[in-house]
């Protein structure tokens, strides 16, 4: 992996870590969705790597519960895969919605019941509305930002850098 690519990944992780922790609604991290959708254009491996490292950093630095991982990881994987097959930001948004809003929220329930020692079945109704809400809010923001970014020469160059290696490594 080139130094240029590592630098870009590091900047993406730093931006995602800070902005996802600062710009948030209690119980929701719509900025994490924004980054997953936009970074899905770099490729499934890279968006997943960025989401995982960001989630781990958020857990340790900002004392975020394991929801940081369950919320971001499934969405990142599906956003990357859906973007790969559709080449559409809306495809990435759909993947993020299903991955984070549905799968991530369902997987979060038993994990949080374990960590918080909760016995209540009401926990099932706690995460899905928040995760779905975050993916809708974050998705709208991501589409608006991407509609401007896709015309940027720098962003196109970054996408080409990541796309070039993924096509030559096959």
Image (cartoon, rainbow, N blue to C red):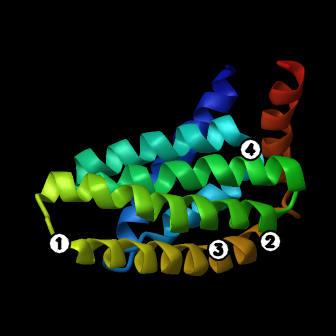
- Residue 135: quadrant of the picture: bottom right
Between label 2 and label 3, give the one nearer the viewer: 3
Query: Alpha carbon of mark 3 to alpha carbon of mark 4: how far?
Result: 17 Å
Q: Seen in the image, is 107 located left or right of residue 66?
A: right
Label 3: element kind: helix
Q: Disc 1 marks which residue?
A: 120
Residue 147 is situated, as x and y percent measured from the top left of the image, at: 81, 72
Q: Disc 3 marks which residue?
A: 139
Name the residue nearer the viewer: 158 or 122. 122
Label 2: element kind: helix
Query: Alpha carbon of mark 2 to alpha carbon of mark 3: how far?
Result: 14 Å
Q: Seen in the image, is 170 located left or right of residue 103?
A: right
Q: Disc 4 marks which residue?
A: 42
Q: Residues within 10 Å of mark 3 (few under 14, many from 20)?
A: many
Q: Disc 2 marks which residue?
A: 148
Query: Alpha carbon of mark 4 to alpha carbon of mark 2: how far?
Result: 16 Å
Q: Earlier in the sequence, mark 2 or mark 3?
A: 3
Q: Residues within 10 Å of mark 1 (few under 14, many from 20)?
A: few
Residue at 24% x, 73% y is: 121
Disc number placed over residue 6 in the picture, else none: none
In the image, residue 125 sits, relative to residue 97, either above or below, namely below
Residue 163 is situated, as x and y percent measured from the top left of the image, at: 84, 36
């Amino acid at each position: 992996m080139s130094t240029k690519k590592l630098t870009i990944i590091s900047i993406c992780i730093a931006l995602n870590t800070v902005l996802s922790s600062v710009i948030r609604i209690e119980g929701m991290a719509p900025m994490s969705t924004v980054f997953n959708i936009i970074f899905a254009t770099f490729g499934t491996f890279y968006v997943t790597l960025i989401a995982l490292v960001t989630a781990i950093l958020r857990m340790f630095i900002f004392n975020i519960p394991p929801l940081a991982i369950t919320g971001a990881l499934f969405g990142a994987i599906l956003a990357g895969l859906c973007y790969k097959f559709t080449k559409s930001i809306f495809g990435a948004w759909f993947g993020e919605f299903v991955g984070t809003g549905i799968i991530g929220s369902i997987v979060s329930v038993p994990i949080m019941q374990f960590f918080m020692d909760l016995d209540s079945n009401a926990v099932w109704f706690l995460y899905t509305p928040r995760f779905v809400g975050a993916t809708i809010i974050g998705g709208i923001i991501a589409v608006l930002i991407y509609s401007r970014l896709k015309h940027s020469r720098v962003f196109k160059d970054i996408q080409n850098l990541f796309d070039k290696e993924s096509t030559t490594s096959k």
